[in-house]
Image: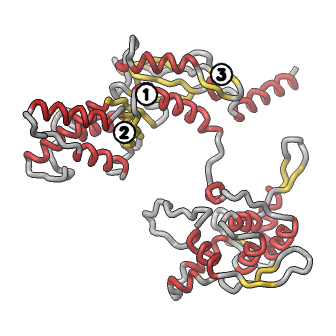
Amino acid sequence: ERAKADKAADKRAHELSSGKHRMRQITCVWDSRLGTTGKDIGYMLRSQLKTGIKDQNKVCECLNTAQMLPVARSVTWRYHPPSDEPMGFRQNGLTADATDGIPYTIAYITGDEFVEMAWRDHVAATRAGYRRGEWDAPEPPGGFRCVIRAAKTLLGRDHVLCLLVTNINGACTTRERRDVRANRGEVGFSRAPVDMEVARIHTRWYHNVRLTVAPDASTAVEHVVNMHRAWAMKPYVKETTILDILGHNGARSTVAEQNALEAAFVAAKSVAPDGTAYESQDLDSQFASQNENLDAAGKRRRTKTPAQVWAAALMKIPRVAEKEAMAIVLKYPTMMSLMVAYEDPSLSESDKRKLLKGLDCVGTHRGAQVRKLGEVISARVYEMFRPRDSDDEGDQVIAPGE
């Protein structure tokens, strides 16, 4: 009986860790002020969530409930143990206490409301003598910055607030035509302040504030449903690493490459993932106890060594094949050693781009001839691993065709 109980407990733990019940472990909580009748977006959202989404080859209903949230007409989510019933937040007076929820809230705003808020800020700043809406410009009630500040005060600084706005361009056009009719042909409204607020959000002018624009309410509802699926899958999706980003050409290491890398790895010092420097033999023994584990079939397998992972990362760079990766690893056994070489202040920018030029590249097939690593590949590797500023967001990507 004890063995059966342990086996059942292990099965339940495996199901939880594998994400089998992930759609039953999250509840979408939407603000009751979104509306529950007719064409209200709350009614549309509830119907779409109840219809469910396809997950793991079956249609799963999305758990959802309506509560009065701190931010009006907003949507957020909450993780909880597997359940067939929605599990919302505990009540704190009239509003729900969303502190134990996911730190991400979507606030629904119509295009007309967004345009009006941006225009109010613009008018107040212009009257006060500010032309571009500096931080110390007045914040009129109902203005965009006043609304954002109030929402962030309720949610917290580190909580992400995503504004889901519908049909901004259509709202601007409607406002322009209305002003032309009201002012007898003179245009009083300008969409420039609206474009300025959109640009500020996209350039992170406001801390942890995002913007998603949808053409209509149905598309906005579809976005919320997709976010529900994404948050349900997030705890069970492998985190994207630099190797995944570089892995667009699907290169794989061969047996000959692995043997050569092992020899190169033993002949040099290296750095462990935690930054500790080891002699190669010490590092190999450090990872030896971790290299053997069980695969899905229960058989023992040996994972890649750090040197093999380093070579595989190099082979993800366009036009860097096995022989070029082996040549680089023989000279620089670890990624850290290459990056340290690139940080040498005595080398000029041109010297760093040509640092790998001239390394001997030998193929693994019989009769392969030695050739030198070229300047183009050396420059490609440098662009990927060159020193970067602390505020660099990594937006300079080497495309496969470049």
First in residue order: circle 2 vs circle 3:
3
Numbered tag placed on residue 15 in the rendering? none
Q: Identify the residue at horizontal 41%, vertical 39% (top origin).
A: 212
Q: Which residue is mark 2?
A: 156
Please indicate whether residue 328 sits to the left or right of residue 77 in the image. right
Identify which amino acid the numbered label 1 is placed on.
Val
Amino acid type, label 3: Val
The residue at the point 78 percent across, 63 percent down is: 305
> Can residue 75 be seen in this snapshot?
yes
Q: Using a 10 Å C-alpha cutoff, classify the residue at mark 3 as few (fewer than 14 neighbours), some (14 to 19) or many (20 or more).
A: few
- Report the residue marked by disc 3: 59
- Quarter of the rendering containing residue 337: bottom right
Mark 1 vs mark 3, CA separation in Å: 22 Å
Amino acid residing under circle 2:
Gly
Q: Is residue 115 above or below residue 127?
A: above
Residue at numbered disc 1: 75
* Residue sitting nearer the eye, 230 or 97: 230
Q: Is residue 398 left or right of residue 31?
A: right
